[in-house]
Amino acid sequence: MKIIQQSHAGTLESGDVLIRIQPLDSPEVEIELESVVSKQFGAAIQRLIHDTLNKLDISGVRVIVEDKGALDCIIRARVQSALIRATGTQLMEYNWSALA
């Protein structure tokens, strides 16, 4: 999938995460992480985001993460939601099995 526009998903409430997606002109993947638990879980959060991007064959993207202690399942869902919006993909067209 190709990123065609900026998007976001999530909130800054406690236990949630705000994910912002921005297209890049290069094939790189950049992750900017700000988290209240970055010392303990920062590397795991970045791996989770990279894994989600890889499963969906996403590159050329900047992911800005403002984490307020979200669980892995919430982070994954917010990344997926932001990617659907950023790619212009319709929910019915989305390949959900790619994430299994």
Image (tube, helix red, strand yellow):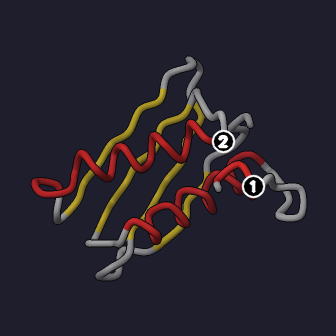
Q: Give the amino acid at mark 2.
A: Leu
Residue 60: image quadrant is top right
Q: Residue at x 59, y 20 (%)?
A: 25
Q: 66 and 41: which one is in front?
A: 41
Q: Residues within 10 Å of mark 2 (few under 14, many from 20)?
A: some
**Residue 11, horizontal then vertical, whole percent:** 44, 74
Residues at badges 2 and 1 in contact (C-beta under 8 Å)?
no
Which element is circle 1 on? Answer: helix
Q: Residue at x 64, y 53 (%)?
A: 99
Quarter holding the C terminus is bottom right
Which element is circle 2 on? Answer: loop
- Residue under circle 2? 56
- Residue under circle 1? 97
Number of the label disc, if any, that sits on residue 26? none
Residues at marks 2 and 1, CA–CA distance in whole angstroms: 10 Å
Please tell me whether residue 14 is drawn above or below residue 44 in the rendered image.
Answer: below
In the rendered image, the residue lying farthest to the top is 26
Please tell me whether residue 96 is drawn above or below residue 14 in the rendered image.
Answer: above
Q: 96 and 91: which one is in front?
A: 96
**Residue 43, horizontal then vertical, whole percent:** 24, 45
**Residue 77, horizontal then vertical, whole percent:** 55, 66
Q: 28 and 100: which one is in front?
A: 100
**Residue 71, horizontal then vertical, whole percent:** 35, 72
